[in-house]
Amino acid sequence: MSVGEETRAQEPQPQQSLGTSAARNLATTTKSAPQMQEISSRWLLQALPWVNVQGGTYRVNRRLTYAVGDGRVTFVKTGDQVQVIPAELGELPALRSFTDEDVLGELARRCRQREVAAGDVLASFGSRVDTVFLLAHGRIEKVGPGPYGTDAVLGVLADGAYFGDQTLTDPDAIWEYTARAVTACTVLELPRTDLDQVAERAPSLAAHLEQLHAAPPRSANKYGEKAIDLSAGHVGEAELPATFVDYEAAPREYELSVAQTVLRVHTRVADLYNQPMNQTEQQLRLTVEALKERQEHELINNKEFGLLHNCEYAQRIQPHDGAPTPDDMDELLSRRRGSKLFLAHPRAIAAFGRECNKRGLVPETIDMGGHRIPTWRGVPLFPCNKIPVSDARTTSIICMRTGEKEQGVIGLHQTGLPDEIEPSLSVRFMGISEQAIISYLVTTYYSAAVLVPDALGVLENVEIGRWQ
């Protein structure tokens, strides 16, 4: 090729048709509605039966229950030193109603920290109980003799649990199980000798423990409720017991919580830019979606009424091996009748699926509005990304019975609000400012109530990062 021909080849050719960039000026662009990544399936809002609360407050009346101190003990960690908060010793049944802060502080100072390796035995079956153990961190198994001569795991304890507290009221108590560390643990020990020394110098503690020792045992059923005296199997004219059903004098009341925001739209936008989509409607749609996401988050995590914080300690169980196995799910189901649903983080569901795969199990699925939802023992396992995952890659699995008639878990809301667009969700016009900005108050009211303690159970500290 000659130099002239090469030069002509490099020269730009004249455009022979209309370019796409110019043509777009005359075209109508096809647009999507505004998208939002935060939107999730929100199965909890769909699965909960909602009860209309006209007065803004829902009172849960229960049969009288004797307080037994089924709480968890809280600790303070400074560096590698762990201390129990003195007032938290009141979670121990024997110290439930004891309020002398100075004495509780002295008992807290006498708790000795101990680091325990995995496999170490803290208490042996049949030996005398002479120490109260407070578990600050780790996991401990309670192992007892089985019916056929083999060891049986009676339970698993985790952070905040305590055991050996019977020594506070019965100096002659013996261990009915062996306490063995499954993982490395940090425990605080309060020996019986230290308790006696404090009681010698603190008449209030001595009198409190003596009163507990001398008080006649309360007649209660296995749930801690005041017993109803009955007679059965008698013949003839036997004298029948007289009884009545006592109620809690101060039942718990749930006030409706609120989630609100003020949506602002400029009148110029609302007037001029409403085709092909209404700007106000789209702004409102995305705002409502965000409110519903926050509503479900609060129903799970709120410290006042959230499910994770309102589960009784007796209904919290620990996985035997860390990962969520079918055995753990069966244990969770066995704690209540008529379980209606599981809630778990999607990563926890994946971890449970891996455990099923190891055993060659394939959970059945059911159709829920066009979605295939896995089940376990016929109970649907719904995903919920509002259940937190800790930095240690652990999470929780919730199991519940629902409905008022079943004495389960219910959602609370109030319908019939002014300018209501959905049940218990309203959008109220607030006016136009001097800057020509339209304001709308978007509000939703909600709460949740656990009618009886065994309606809600939690499998805690579930490991989701194990792959083998």
Image (spheres, helix red, strand yellow):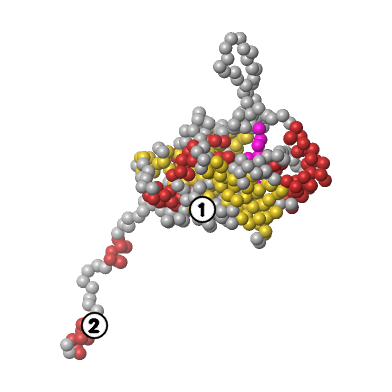
For the N terminus, the quadrant is bottom left
For the C terminus, the quadrant is bottom left
Q: Which mark is residue 10?
A: 2
| Chief secondary structure of the magenta portion | loop
Percent across and percent down for residue 210 are 77, 36
Q: Quadrant of residue 76?
A: bottom right
Q: Nearer the viewer, residue 283 or 331?
A: 331
Q: CA distance from mark 2 to mark 1?
A: 65 Å
Residue projecting furthest to the left: 1
Which region is colored magenta? 66-73
Question: Label 1 amino acid?
Answer: Thr
Residue projecting furthest to the front: 149
**Which residue appears at 63% of the width and 42% of the height?**
126
Q: Single out the mark in the foreground, 2 or 1.
A: 1
Percent across and percent down for residue 143 are 56, 44
Question: Label 2 amino acid?
Answer: Gln
Precedes in sequence: disc 2 or disc 1: 2
Residue 272 in sight: no
As for residue 200 lying within the magenta part, the answer is no
> From the viewer's perspective, is residue 9 above or below residue 232?
below
Percent across and percent down for residue 2 are 17, 89
Residue pointed to by mark 1: 394
**Which residue appears at 50% of the width and 47% of the height?**
319
Residue 392 in sight: yes
